[in-house]
Image: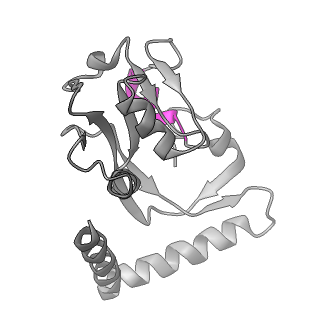
Amino acid sequence: RPNCEETPDEYRCQTFLFSDSMFEILELVYVDNTHPITFDKDEDMVGKTLCRMSGYSTHELDQGGRNWVKDGKIKLERPDGVDDCFNLLTEGKVDAVMIDEFAGKAVIKEMGMLERIQPLPRPLGIVPLNVLIHKGNPRAEELVGVINSGLAKLKEKGDYQKIVGTHLAQFWADQ
């Protein structure tokens, strides 16, 4: 879910209703250890070439006054696959790859580059994951209510934490 309060004209804000956050993930900046860069403050990315897979949102690049894309502060490469971004990174054609921690780890493991490509300590952002329902659906508000109610019940009973804990433990054990 983009920050619709800050960017109400963003496509997803105009088009969808969002459930409560089901989970939050870290959006990380991955770099090649042979060509390290720092990301201690937003200004560190000015002038850099970043890679974000086509189809993935870029709203976090302009949030909070960053305006990296909006003001042309960075160059953005948008290939079709995440592995394409990581290949561009190891070829020295981009300075960093922006992807969530789970997809990033899975792809660099699959590519055999766990030692070469690492996420920087500072996350690009914390991204809530929500169910999206098209505003054109005549039952959109009702469906969001059902999802939110079910999620609240899972959390109230303690089942939510068990489910998330089980899945996270399995994911990190496989890494």
Q: Quadrant of the C terminus?
A: bottom left
Q: Quadrant of residue 28?
A: top left
- Identify the image's colour scheme: rainbow, by chain, secondary structure or one colour: one colour
Does 87 sit above or below residue 135?
Answer: above
Instruction: Decide which of 148, 123 is in the foreground and name it.
Output: 123
Instruction: Decide which of 163, 1 is in the foreground and name it.
Output: 163
Q: Quadrant of residue 93?
A: top left
Indicate yes or no whether the magenta region holds residue 61.
yes
Instruction: Decide which of 125, 119 is in the foreground and name it.
Output: 119
- Residue ID at (40%, 53%): 107
In the image, residue 122 lies at what x, y percent? 21, 37
Would you say 137 lies left or right of 146 here?
right
Indicate yes or no whether the magenta region holds residue 111.
no
Would you say 123 lies left or right of 75 here?
left
In the image, residue 130 lies at what x, y percent? 51, 60
In the image, residue 48 lies at what x, y percent? 37, 17
- Residue ID at (60%, 35%): 8
In the image, residue 69 lies at what x, y percent? 51, 20
Would you say 139 lies left or right of 112 here?
right
- Residue ID at (29%, 22%): 42
- Residue ID at (59%, 77%): 146
Count of marks, rendered view:
0
Magenta stretch: dominant secondary structure: helix
Q: Is residue 3 visible?
A: no
Does 103 sit above or below residue 116?
Answer: below
Q: Is residue 21 visible?
A: yes
Magenta part of the chain: 57-66
